Amino acid sequence: MAIYAIGDVQGCHDELVALLERLDFDPSRDQAWLVGDLVNRGPKSLETLRTLRSLGEATVCVLGNHDLHLLAVAAGVTRTKHRDTFADVLGAPDRDELLDWLRRRPLLHHGEGFYLIHAGLPPQWSVAQAAALAREAEAVLQGDSPGEFLWHMYGDEPDRWDEGLGDWERLRFITNCLTRLRYCTLDGRVDFRQKGRPGTQPAGLVPWFAVPDRRSAGARIVFGHWSTLGYHVRDGVCCLDTGCLWGGELTALRLDGERRERIAVPNRQGRYQTPARA
């Protein structure tokens, strides 16, 4: 059995199929772990969801911010944005089945010695704490009233973890970190605005994984979300968002075995959208 982690697909279905073929992926034998943002901005969100759902237990998909945005639009709690490209999902005859499958994906997956998330962890969290907090948010999203969760998840506050946060503030902070985080201050205040590569951020901000003495240090964490960072493997963290959407590559990393092997396929049609309008 081979286990492959795969970066942000974002509706780049042709590249996903090409990558699985390149991996000689066999769902009866192998597993694909996707770092989230399965949909949106690329041209084929519907085909992407159908393909991944069809693979059954051979896939593990954590939720990204674009996946949650699709769920929120479908639930009627927010409107589409001018660059959204998931109308194909919203109008599909199997829409309800696909959206129900999507909202039941986890925010964090732990297995084989790795932690799979979409974005980041604030420095106050250990990986065990992060896993427990992710389950709190998942329980509400997967419960009987997901619309209420989706309504309350929008916003950049609070920007610092506090065990005493109120219910919706707590769930918003958990969701924001796991699906949107890139930068933090050295004292653990999170920032959700900066999207550029390290070195372009304002003074006082560092990548979440570079905060000294973060409690998740030493854990092996695989994430995406950060196309301007690109492929990054250092100190136990691995970013797999290599910007397929922007004309880059769709990347897989083999996680099992002694050697970490990177396999990638290029974007097949050039940029689907431009980073300046992301």
Image (spheres, helix red, strand yellow):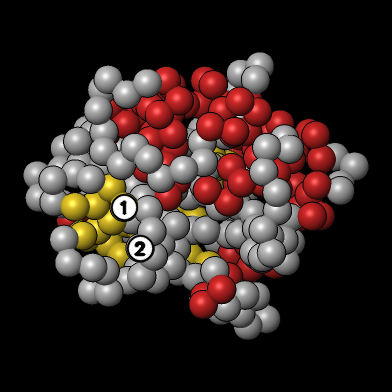
Where is residue 277? Give x, y as percent: 56, 73
Give the residue displayed 44% in from the left and 57% down from the top. Answer: 225
Q: Secondary structure at mark 1?
A: strand
Total numbered labels = 2
Q: Nearer the viewer, residue 19 or 66?
A: 66
Q: Is residue 45 left or right of residue 182?
A: right
Above or below for 132 versus 154? above
Within 10 Å of disc 2 (Cα), the crowding (few <14, some 14-19, many 20+) is some
**Residue bearing mark 1:** 191
Q: Which residue does the numbered mark 2 point to in the structure image? A: 194
Q: Tell me the residue at 32%/31% (across/down).
A: 130
Circle 1 crowding by C-alpha within 10 Å: few under 14, some 14–19, many from 20: many
Q: CA distance from mark 2 to mark 1?
A: 7 Å
Vertical placement of 49 versus 103: above or below?
Answer: below
Tell me, yes or no, if residue 20 can be seen here: no
Q: Position of residue 90 (x, y in %)?
A: 80, 47
Q: Secondary structure at mark 2?
A: loop
Q: Quadrant of residue 140?
A: top right
Answer with left or right where residue 233 lies relative to residue 256. Answer: left
- Taking 117 as reference, is 23 above or below it? below
Q: Note whether residue 151 is visible.
A: yes
Q: Position of residue 163 (x, y in %)?
A: 26, 22
Toward the left, the furthest residue is 213
Asked if marks 2 and 1 touch (Cβ < 8 Å), the reply is yes
Query: Closer to the camera, 276 or 86?
Result: 276
> What's under tag 2, amino acid-wise?
Gln
Look at 72% across and 35% down and name the residue there: 75
- Residue 77: where, in percent of width, then height? 68, 37
